Structure formats: structure tokens, C-alpha cells
């Protein structure tokens, strides 16, 4: 059984930044669904490149079979890991259902780390982070935020009802956010 922590929050809430630190210090392997999709988009011979780019620009969500397979392949490649941080997934009901179908029997979901941050702050961060992403522009960001509000937030609420959500306010300097995140992991791993 793979141990999994889902990391969710609006675009620009700091998921990638915080996951990198957890990976470095706490021994979880960081798998960003967005990064895996971008790598697949760039991969020579991929039949999904154009489809992925369309979804990324539109802030819409790639069919779960593609994303979930990329995640599973990445997990198999790191079977030695203590646990996995799955960053930016599941984002909607299709993602959640597909994950359960494909991975339900193979994983133990530990908790959901929810990085909460006001949307205007998040948008500002994305517009200034200079990562050269094709979706860090005002048009794409509006769509990404809509998708987050309409599709992803209900997934967080779903996990909340199951008592699985650990919320950390990420509208603060990274070191402060990370300090609270460490406490969340310490508490979860004590149980
Ligand atoms: N994406 C997707 N499924 C996923 C993760 C990402 O379809 O499970 C697509 C989606 O179009 C999203 C984009 O990839 O807007 C960028 O995702 P990422 O997590 O990198 O960015 P975020 O919006 O969290 O900053
Ligand atoms: Mg990200």
C-alpha cells in the first residue's frame, strides 16, 4: 500500500513550494500532477500533448485516465518512498472517481493538506512568479480560479466531511506556513 497525502488549494496557494520542503525534510516523494502533465506535454511521441496544453490554457481538467496513469507510473518508479505528496490532484469528481477506480486498492490516504489563501493574493502571486507557464496570465487564471471554485473546492469539502482535511493558512511567509505544515505531519505520523 502506498501512503498518500493529497495537497490541495487554489492556484498560487504555495503547493509546489511547500511540497518541495516537505520532500526535502520529511522523506515524502513530491508528485505534482501539473508537472507530470507538463512533462507529458513535452514528451516526444506523446499522443496527449495538444490535449493537455488545451486544458492547461483553459484551466480545465485533463481526463483522469491520463493524469492518474502518470501518477501511478511515477509512484511505481519510487516504490521505496515512505509516502507520496500528490500535489494538485484530485481536482474534480471525475478525478476522484477515476483515482478510486485505478488506485483505491493500492493506496492508503493519510490526510488532505489544504493550503488556504485568498484568491486575489493567489492570482497576484501567479502573475509575478515568472515561471514562464502558459497559464500564468490573467485570462487563464480567471478560468483556473473558476475551476477551483466550482470543481476543486467541493472535493476539499468531501474530504472535510470524512475528517481528513488539515487546513493551513498559506497567506503568510513560507517559513511560517511550513512550520505549521510540519506540525500537521508530526501529528498525523504519531497516530
Ligand atoms: N491539471 C489537470 N489535472 C490535474 C492537475 C493539473 O488537468 O490533476 C491541469 C489543469 O489544467 C491545471 C493545470 O494543469 O489548471 C496546472 O496545474 P498545476 O497544479 O500545475 O497548477 P495550479 O493551478 O495548482 O497552480
Ligand atoms: Mg503547482
Image (cartoon, grey):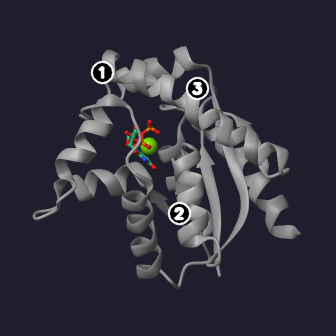
Within 10 Å of disc 3 (Cα), the crowding (few <14, some 14-19, many 20+) is few
| Residue that numbered label 3 is attached to | 149
Q: Residues within 10 Å of mark 2 (few under 14, many from 20)?
A: few
The residue nearer to you, when weighing 185 against 6, is 6
Q: Secondary structure at mark 3?
A: helix
Where does the C terminus fall, quadrant-wise?
bottom right
Q: Secondary structure at mark 2?
A: helix
Disc 2 or disc 3, which is closer to the eye? Answer: 3
- The residue lying furthest to the bottom in this view is 80
In percent of width and height, residue 151 lies at: 57, 34
Q: Which is more toward the observer, 126 or 61?
A: 61
**The quadrant where residue 176 appears:** top right
Q: Residue at x 54, y 30 (%)?
A: 148
Front residue (pair 166, 66): 66
Q: Nearer the viewer, mark 2 or mark 1?
A: 1
Separation of marks 2 and 3 at Cα, in angstroms: 31 Å
- The residue pinned by badge 2 equals 24
Q: Is residue 104 left or right of residue 58?
A: right
Find disc 1 in the rendering and name its residue.
137
Q: Is residue 166 above or below residue 25?
A: above
Q: Is residue 141 left or right of residue 108?
A: left
Q: What whole-number distance in Å separates the C-alpha atoms at marks 2 and 1? A: 30 Å
Residue lying farthest to the right in this orientation: 191
Q: How far across and how far down the image is residue 39, in percent?
A: 26, 57
Q: CA distance from mark 3 to mark 1?
A: 18 Å
Amino acid at each position: 500500500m502506498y501512503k498518500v497525502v493529497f495537497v490541495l488549494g487554489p492556484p498560487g496557494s504555495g503547493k509546489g513550494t511547500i511540497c518541495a520542503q516537505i520532500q526535502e525534510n520529511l522523506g515524502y516523494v513530491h508528485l505534482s500532477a501539473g508537472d507530470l502533465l507538463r512533462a507529458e506535454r513535452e514528451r516526444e511521441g506523446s499522443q496527449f500533448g495538444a490535449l493537455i496544453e488545451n486544458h492547461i490554457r483553459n484551466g480545465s481538467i485533463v481526463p483522469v485516465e491520463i493524469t492518474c496513469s502518470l501518477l501511478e507510473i511515477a509512484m511505481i518508479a519510487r516504490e521505496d518512498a515512505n509516502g507520496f505528496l500528490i500535489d494538485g490532484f484530485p481536482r474534480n469528481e471525475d478525478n476522484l472517481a477515476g483515482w478510486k477506480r485505478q488506485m483505491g486498492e493500492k493506496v492508503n490516504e493519510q490526510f488532505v493538506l489544504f493550503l488556504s489563501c485568498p484568491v486575489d493574493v493567489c492570482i497576484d502571486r501567479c502573475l509575478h512568479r515568472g515561471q514562464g507557464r502558459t497559464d500564468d496570465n490573467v485570462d487563464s487564471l480567471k478560468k483556473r480560479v473558476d475551476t477551483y471554485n466550482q470543481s476543486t473546492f467541493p472535493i476539499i469539502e468531501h474530504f472535510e466531511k470524512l475528517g481528513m482535511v488539515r487546513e493551513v493558512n498559506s497567506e503568510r511567509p513560507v517559513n511560517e506556513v511550513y512550520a505549521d505544515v510540519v506540525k500537521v505531519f508530526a501529528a498525523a505520523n504519531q497516530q
